[in-house]
Image (tube, helix red, strand yellow):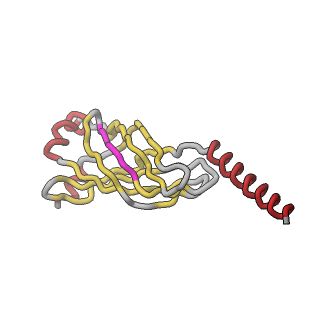
Amino acid sequence: MRTLSRALILAILISCFSACSSLTSFEKPTLSIADLRPTKFARDGQVFTLKLKVDNPNGIALPIAGLNYALNLSGYDIAQGFSDNAVSIPANGTGFVEVDIKANLIEILPKLAKSLMSGDRSLSYDLKGQVNLNSRFVKTIPFDKKGEIEFNPFDLMKIAL
């Protein structure tokens, strides 16, 4: 009986150490904007769908419960908010999270007009926030991603028509 309880304790300790070792090798996923497209006009602003690409470099799935974000385009704060869209990003894989954001075009377009009218279809972005996980060990993962995204202002006219 004593040998059985020692073996059980040893098995529990080994599983705890292996769980801890997988935590120490946890790598932060990377996020980037895959797409930003206007979806509809609302009385209080334009609704865009922001599609985020999430690359998970870990050997376990990433259970995303939602995220908080702030989006800056060409130096202007465009939107901030949260999403509670739950999605699981596969181990060593890629997945996508879509977030609807609302922005006031009357405020945004004059600020972005110079960039949009220059014929350059790309806008610089800065996306900051945190991914909220449904995990017992890691609860949140902060992110700060800068990059360029293509945006066609004529897509806005398609939604309006």
Bounds of the magenta span?
67-73
Front residue of 73/68: it is 68
- Tally the marks: 0
Front residue of 64/140: it is 140
In the image, what residue occupies the spot 44% across and 41% down? 143
On the image, the x and y values in percent for residue 153 come to: 24, 47
Front residue of 58/122: it is 58
In the image, what residue occupies the spot 44% across and 45% down? 32
Q: Is residue 159 left or right of residue 72?
A: left
Q: Quadrant of residue 86?
A: bottom left
Q: Is residue 43 left or right of residue 119?
A: left
Name of the residue lying farthest toward the front: 2
Q: Is residue 81 left or right of residue 52?
A: left
On the image, the x and y values in percent for residue 40 come to: 22, 59
Judged by its main secondary structure, the magenta piece is strand
Q: Is residue 149 left or right of residue 27?
A: left
Placement of the C terminus among the 4 image quadrants: bottom left
Asked if the stretch drawn in magenta spans residue 18, the answer is: no
On the image, the x and y values in percent for residue 27 come to: 58, 43
Q: Quadrant of residue 6?
A: bottom right
Q: Is residue 64 above or below residue 73?
A: below
In the image, what residue occupies the spot 30% across and 37% down? 120
